[in-house]
Image: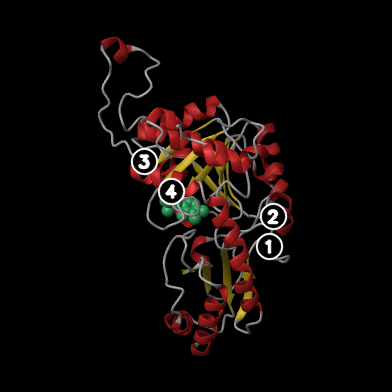
Amino acid sequence: MTNKNHKFETRIVHAGRNPDEYFGVVNTPIARTSTILYDNLDAYFAPDTKYRYGRVNNPVAQHFEEAVSTLEGGYHAISTGSGFSAVTTSILSFVQSGDHILIVDSAYAPTRIFAQQELIKLGIEVEFYEPTLDAGIEELIRENTSVIYMESPGSYSFTTQDVAAITKIAKSHGITTILDNTYSAGLLFNPIKHGVNIAVQSAAKYISGHSDLNLGFAVADTEENYKRLKTTAVNLGVCAGPEDMFLAMRGLRTLQMRMEQANENVKPIIEWFQGQTFVQKIYNPALPDNPGHENWKKYFGGKTNGLFSVLFDPKYSWKDIARFTDALTLFPVGSSWGGYESLIQPSEMKKCREFWPHKGALLRFQVGNEHPDDLIRDLGNSVNHL
Ligand SMILES: *Cc1c(COP(=O)(O)O)cnc(C)c1O
């Protein structure tokens, strides 16, 4: 239906579906599987039989994996029950006992905890690196470094890394690179084009876009790396539910419009915060003083998603801030982001960073599809309670 000459938007509309397979039905139907019957005993033993057992492969997973591989511009993908299991499965695919792994300090907090609690148990040396290091990472590379793990922009502070500089160095040392690309949803940035081996995402964020599923994936750049991912995924029993994959593929078709809207809606809200005296610093990759802003300009085509963080003046305690957040009516407190509604999430940065010199509480805001005028009025009313 589509070919490589088509533009990205066109390919994403058609990726991972084939109406001819299903009586002309537009979207790949939800096929619920565990057992998949073989034609006969020969098919059971034939190495090229496509679907054998639902957990290992099935028609919905196949289409979802094709779609996200097109999105990321990679060879093929594994689908996983959550974004986080895509992170852990990807790391476990490329490390073994005795290895050293470099993980960006601004990684999603559970990724850090996984490294500190699980990778260490396996005898892997874990080192967190400063997110603005870029090409300076070369000095941290050891004989036994097997993986450099990036997230760009990183969680909460949205530091954007010089991905091409890092992958160039990694390749020269035979190191595998993994990048958590959830921020961009694969739309604003394609890490594989810049030399990353594995692009990981939580599909619970912008791809699904409606805060109603847990799903993830990892796309490999080559057949060889895909096979390593798939082997580890099968050995760990990792798989994803067909209804979640169906919904994520449906979300994919409107991803571009929703991301465009997020990029627009977030701007007036950030502007409002820029005029407030309680603000110590605002974090968003498009702000010129944000760490890694030059990298964001280089890699992100001038677009952001709907996230930003506010670091409060240290004179405000969480108790003070709670008076502000409790008064908000359009910004409930909730984990995750990328849905249609606005949210806030607090973070205790000192607990999830090695390199975080700042004092003061931090709130991350996700701006949804509400009208910005209403959001600003809500913020304006609530700030009187601070
Ligand atoms: C949410 C998130 C994840 C984990 O995804 P889940 O689907 O919640 O398991 C991983 N990385 C980043 C950057 C995230 O924001």
Which numbered circle lies on residue 240?
A: 3
Q: Residue beneath label 4, please?
A: 84
Ligand 1 within 8 Å of disc 4? The answer is yes
Contact, mark 2 vs mark 1 (Cβ under 8 Å): yes
Q: Is residue 275 above or below residue 129?
A: below
Q: Residue beneath label 2, please?
A: 296
For mark 2, does the 10 Å Cα neighbourhood hold few (<14), some (14 to 19), or many (20 or more) residues? many
Q: Secondary structure at mark 2?
A: helix
Q: Amino acid at mark 1?
A: Ala
Question: At which x and y percent is residue 330?
Answer: 46, 75
Q: Amino acid at mark 3?
A: Ala
Q: Is residue 94 above or below residue 52?
A: below
Of the residues under marks 2 and 3, which one precedes in the sequence? 3
Q: Amino acid at mark 2?
A: Trp
Q: Nearer the viewer, mark 4 or mark 1?
A: 1
Q: Quadrant of the N terminus?
A: top right
Q: Secondary structure at mark 4?
A: helix
Which residue does the image show at 46% across and 41% down from the upper left? Answer: 217
**Residues under labels 3 and 4: Cα distance?**
12 Å
For mark 4, does the 10 Å Cα neighbourhood hold few (<14), some (14 to 19), or many (20 or more) residues? many
Q: Residue furthest bottom?
A: 384
**Residues under labels 4 and 1: Cα distance?**
26 Å
Q: Amino acid at mark 4?
A: Phe
Q: Residue beneath label 1, please?
A: 286
All told, the count of numbered labels is 4
Q: Nearer the viewer, mark 4 or mark 2?
A: 2
